[in-house]
Image (cartoon, rainbow, N blue to C red):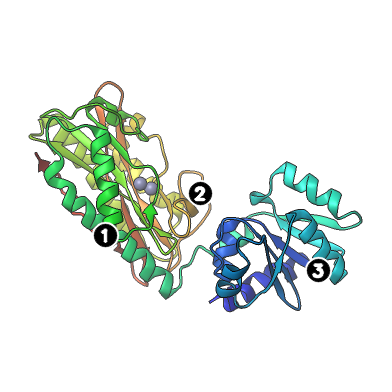
Amino acid sequence: MGDTRLAAATTVLESTGVDALLVLGLTNIRYLTGFSGSDGALLMGRDGQWLLCDGRYTLQARGEATSCTVVEYKVKSDGIAGLVAGQGWRRVAFDAEQTTVAVHRTLAAAMVGVELLPVAGELDDLRRVKSAAELVAIEKSCTLASEALEQLLPMIRPGVTERSLALELEILMKRAGAEEKAFDFIVAAGERGALPHGHPTERVLAAGELVTIDFGARLHGYHSDETVTMAVGSADGRQREIYGVVKEAHDLAMAAVRPGAGCRELDGIARDHIARCGFGAYFGHGLGHGVGLEIHEKPTLSPRSEQKLAEGMVVTIEPGIYIPDWGGVRIEDTVVVTATGCRPLTKVAKELRIVG
Ligand code: ZN
Ligand code: ZN
């Protein structure tokens, strides 16, 4: 698995004209080598790859990062500096988005005479288009999370708290095999739905309210991301109207997803529809984002995005309307871009549901 990705990363090394590439971001290390430990470094030269880790991870690294030589260190910066000196490398590129100023300072002090050059984004770009195996993992994660939400439905009723719903959903997911939740779930009822990222509280659900639940699982390192908004007991005319506008924006954007589609244009399709319906002031975030080894990764679907979709990318479509003192509606699916359009990986039906 790592070999073809390491080869792709080597082209980054060649295009920057350096002797070696230092990767410190754990997600990129996992993507490139298979190593899933929580600390380490990857050095890629023209003649080989070295995975550096401390003694806790040496055995694991040998098992997972089979295309790398595993080097154990006591102090990470010394381990990196020792290998760089031993290989005679003079110019080393590092992933700037994953390296803090403090770490850079420590590395520079340990490697006197070595030129450190930042690369930004090139490694993350490699992860945008998913392999067949990655798509299987993401779809499994999505299916597991969607099924857990379906099991939660009988519990969504007047009198239950946001927090207990979040906790129960986490238990359902983990019982079904999720290794972790993809992120801290959002459960926001009634007027709290106006908070796009409302963390679950002890607030009790009441009949006649909407509740928004944003949730996902992590399985084999891969995430899922889905949002449902449901009506507790009943829905009034305004709730149905606003739900309908968000659902139409969601459906219009989904129908426009295809290879070559501009991420900014897709965002605009949903945003323009919401604005035409009179709610333009209430959709304050981007339409979506890539999903994979990280819950938020490239590409970004927003009014500022310059990226275009390609077959095999996995992105979310998640328009919303958030009105202070009233509440909110968000509808989100994770989809894979296919040759001709897209296929949803998340499974919960998005028609307005009355629960409880
Ligand atoms: Zn989400
Ligand atoms: Zn999302």
Q: Is mark 3 within 8 Å of ligand 2?
A: no
Number of the front mark, 1 or 3: 1
- Please, is residue 214 above or below residue 325 in the view? below
Query: Disc 2 marks which residue?
Result: 305
Horizontal and vertical percent position of residue 181: 37, 50
Query: Disc 3 marks which residue?
Result: 19
Determine whether the residue tagged by mark 1 lies in a helix, strand or loop: loop
Horizontal and vertical percent position of residue 22: 72, 61
Residue at x 88%, y 69% (from the top left corner): 88
Horizontal and vertical percent position of residue 286: 42, 43
Number of the front mark, 2 or 1: 1
Q: Is mark 1 within 8 Å of ligand 1?
A: no
> Dividing the picture into quarters, in which one does residue 205 lie?
top left
In this orientation, which residue lies closer to the viewer: 347 or 47? 47
The answer to whether residue 330 is visible is no
C-alpha separation, residue under disc 3 versus residue under disc 2: 32 Å
> Dividing the picture into quarters, in which one does residue 111 lie?
bottom right
* Amino acid type at image mark 1: Ala
Q: Which mark is residue 110?
A: none
- Please, is residue 265 above or below residue 284 in the view? below
C-alpha separation, residue under disc 1 versus residue under disc 3: 46 Å
Task: Give the mark, 3 or 2, whose residue is nearer the N terminus.
Answer: 3
**Residue projecting furthest to the top:** 325
Quadrant of the frame with the C terminus: top left
Horizontal and vertical percent position of residue 198: 34, 32
Number of the front mark, 3 or 2: 3
Query: Disc 1 marks which residue?
Result: 176
Badge 1 density bin: few <14, some 14–19, many ≥20, Cα 10 Å: few
